[in-house]
Image (cartoon, helix red, strand yellow):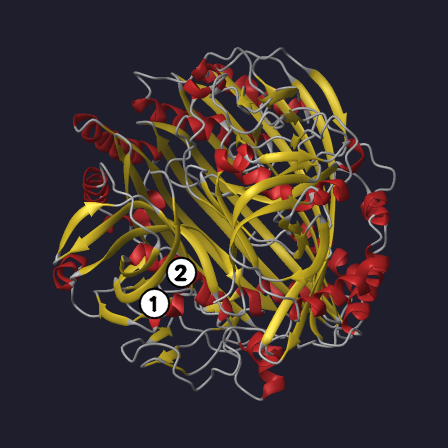
Amino acid sequence: MKIDKTIIDFLRKKKECDDVVVYYTKEDSNLSRFSENRITQNMSKKFEEFTVEAIKDKRIGSAETTKIDRASLLRTLRSAESIASAMPKDPEFMPPLKPERCSNVRMEVEATARITPQTKAESILHIVEKAKSKNAKVAGIFYNGRKRLSCLNTRGFFVDHNYTDADFSVTVFVGDSSGFAEKTGEDVKKIDVEQVFNVALNKAEMGRNPVKIKPGDYPILLEPIAFGSLMWYLKFLMEKRSADEGWSFFSKKEGKKIASSNITIFSDPTYPGNLGIPFDMGNEGLPLKKQLWIKDGVLRKLWTNRYWAKKKRVKATGMPSNLIVNGGKMTTEDIIKKVDYGLLITRLWYIRFVNRKDLVLTGMTRDGLFLIENGKISKAVKNMRFNDSPFTILSKVKYLGKPEMVEGRFLVPAVFAKKFHFASTTKF
Amino acid sequence: MRTLCKYAISIAKKLGADYSDIRITDDRSQRIVLVDRSPKEIRDENVYGFGVRILKDGAWGFASSNRITKKEIEKIVKNAYKIAKASSLLSRENGIRLAPEPVHKDKFTTPVKIDPFSIGIDEKIGMLLKINETMLNVKSIIKVYSYLIANQREQTFASQEGSFIKTKITTVNSDYTAVALKGNDSQMRSFQSYPKNAGWEHILSLKMVENAERVAEEAVEKLSASYPKEGKKDLVLNPCHLSLTIHESVGHPTELDRVMGYETNFAGRSFATPEKLGNFRYGSKLVNFIADNTLPGGLATTGYDDEGVKCQKWNVIKNGILVDYSSTREVAPLIGERRSRGSGRADAYYSFPINRIPNLYLAPGKKDVSPDELISRVKEGIYIEGLGSFSIDQRRLNFQFGGDLFYEIKNGKKGKMLRDVIYHSITPDFWGSLDGLSGKKYWEPRGIFNCGKGEPQQIAQMTNGAPYALFRKVNVKRGKK
């Protein structure tokens, strides 16, 4: 079935409600997963889904189906209409979007969609052989996929985005020591599997014989992958409504300085080197524009949905699909040379709230924790648990490295901050 | 369905598959979410498709599609075979051997008294609106959330070995949360319900509306509660709270795939390695963990797992000693086991079955001890209810948990309410400090609804039950800056 504007006419003719909004998602992906030097899971996924929202007198009902044909679309519409009829009026109802211009972001790379399980298996075999020659073991994933997201409604709104993505991540074990590295992006040709493996191998080799150090406050150098895992929390929590209602970390902070002067964070789906989905599927397909969230350490804006934006008489931004943190030109190695004392953190794990209002998080370091002394990595350290806020880091940033794209479309630099709190240690 | 399954298997056989299976899965899910008085999500979802798994030359290939036609099945089986051949590039030295499983031709259906899909949307919304309205009427409550989920999976499994299994699993889940605000301070409190493989009758039994005012009032009370004094304290943990501690510190470390390194890149490994089987002291002599995928209402009580292995009951930790793991047909032989423990599960037609935590519970004490009797044995400690913050390291040793409601215990009595309590320990030290269990009467099955694992990440459900339990000298901290 063709997904285009003809669906709008079809729905206009068939609807028994005021308006219809349809979301379409399609995924054709392959993932090869390996561990203990062999492929343990190798899979192909084909998935398509219609989500149909029927709107009747400020009542909304929603139904979804993976059967993709006009008859199923109509059946799903009838289900959605029936649900809408049983609903109370939504006091926060917003009418569907009118046709609006949306950025055309080209994120589709044919080579990514076409790389075969055979080619990926050959790449994995290559690094497995390398690992064996170093008495190491590897585990990881090699993923590639082509996806499509569309949103349309009976008022004529239609946005559509095709993209590809690839991800190669690897954990190397040398004895009891592990190292991790990852590269993601829309173009699989830009992923140098051997280079990623070498970074992880180097970490694993350096991480042998770790020493236990006392928990407490330490200066830290967060590598981009570790920094990126904290950015998820910023992305979801930098939201205006909960801040206005008073129960968010960001309450009463708009316009105030919340980070070091060298921190600027923005989003832009058209940003070269970190393209993003140009509309927000969680906000009726609202087109996303460039937004400046933190400028020179000052919180300029929080993201907002359409209802809250109308209530507060501001422009709805939608939730950003990417985040970019400004950086410098230094590599992680350059920053290490400038550090007298601190911890180098490769990766963070199992991050959860300890206290939502204070934005205190907990989590563990993993796959490469090292002590830096006098501009050099002096020793490997046993992993530790942190209990602190990402804003402890962001408000004490001394050095920023060259930004790199990490999971979740975050373009972030390595960050050296003067203080971060570790509450306990573990056994390895 | 039988014809389509036979067709898939016949193509796989013709291609030369050493083993193949197909799952045709029809998932229906109804999800209702209310924020304050606004319905935020009212969704009826139907995900229908099939997945084919082929083993060739000791390596897996898996392919799936949402288009269920003969032509598509042929295409997908051929693709799965091609992928298995690609995987076999790396299986020359250590190819997969599956643990044998008897051939099953069977059906399993969750016993349901009231079909949750037969209850009108208006009735469901009405219940949630009443809950939200009740909580919003409590002074200082500024935000409320409530949700209701009903899932039903109808699945047909067929294997090249001749198994043909039809299952119909129904699950219901509902909960709600109130946010209280005073000045710049806010606190949350949830009802702390639990999901169950059952019908609407489970939702009715929870008395959700009746508890809404209490939950909201407790959220407000938390605002003026005291912070804990940091240091070593005795803890009395309620079954709801303990279910998550069990899940993280016993359920995950005893997944055999993790033990054997399959989750190294994401969810991590386990300290509970095979040489420890039968001799490692995981906890005190009071610690008895039983896995039971036949437990009535259990979220992993599905008759058969997604590899066609019949659900079983077994000991994981006996008198404090590690004695077994959960496993799949692939990993069981790696430690010489002759049969899988039936823990291979997939979260959708497009997912590959992986080793999941079974229904796993801490057995109650032999004597009919009450929670109050446990509290009476504590000179200085904290009583913790419900789920809060949770995090554990990638080998399942260092963990830290919060909770939803806390009370000081002084000289054997439950005292004033506390707030922002977290505790930290190392898994065997924590279970080694278990010094008391309530009796069978106070044992509760609690469910974990969103257990994430695997790459791509899959979400699974299982029940983790517990009695009330007393732990000695656990490291307590204040979870606030």
The front one of A376 and A217 is: A217
- Quadrant of the image containing the N terminus of chain B: top right
Marks 2 & 1 on one chain = yes
The front one of B291 and B444 is: B444
Where in the figure is residue B389, as x and y percent of width and height? 55, 54
What residue appears at the point 32 percent right and 54 percent down from the top-left corner?
Answer: A109
Whether A148 is drawn above or below A140: the answer is below
Please state the total of marks drawn on the protein image: 2
The front one of B274 and B75 is: B274
Graded by Cα atoms within 10 Å as few (under 14), some (14 to 19) or many (20 or more), the crowding at tag 2 reads some
Where in the figure is residue B218, as x and y percent of width and height? 73, 64
Distance from Cα at disc 2 to Cα at disc 1: 10 Å
Rendered image quadrant of residue B110: top right
Q: Is residue B96 left or right of residue B112?
A: left
Query: Badge 1 sits on which subunit?
Result: A
Q: Is residue B320 left or right of residue B238?
A: left
What residue appears at the point 73 percent right and 51 percent down from the top-left corner?
Answer: B413
Graded by Cα atoms within 10 Å as few (under 14), some (14 to 19) or many (20 or more), the crowding at tag 1 reads many
Q: Amino acid at mark 1?
A: Ile
Whether B234 is drawn above or below B89: the answer is below
The front one of A360 and A286 is: A360
Q: Amino acid at mark 2?
A: Leu
**Mark 2 or mark 1: which comes first in sequence?**
2
Q: Is residue A392 left or right of residue B54?
A: left
Rendered image quadrant of residue B404: bottom right
Where in the figure is residue B235, as x and y percent of width and height? 61, 46
Query: Badge 2 sits on which subunit?
Result: A
Q: Which residue is mark 2?
A: A230
What residue appears at the point 61 percent right and 49 percent down from the top-left corner?
Answer: A68
Q: Which residue is mark 1?
A: A393
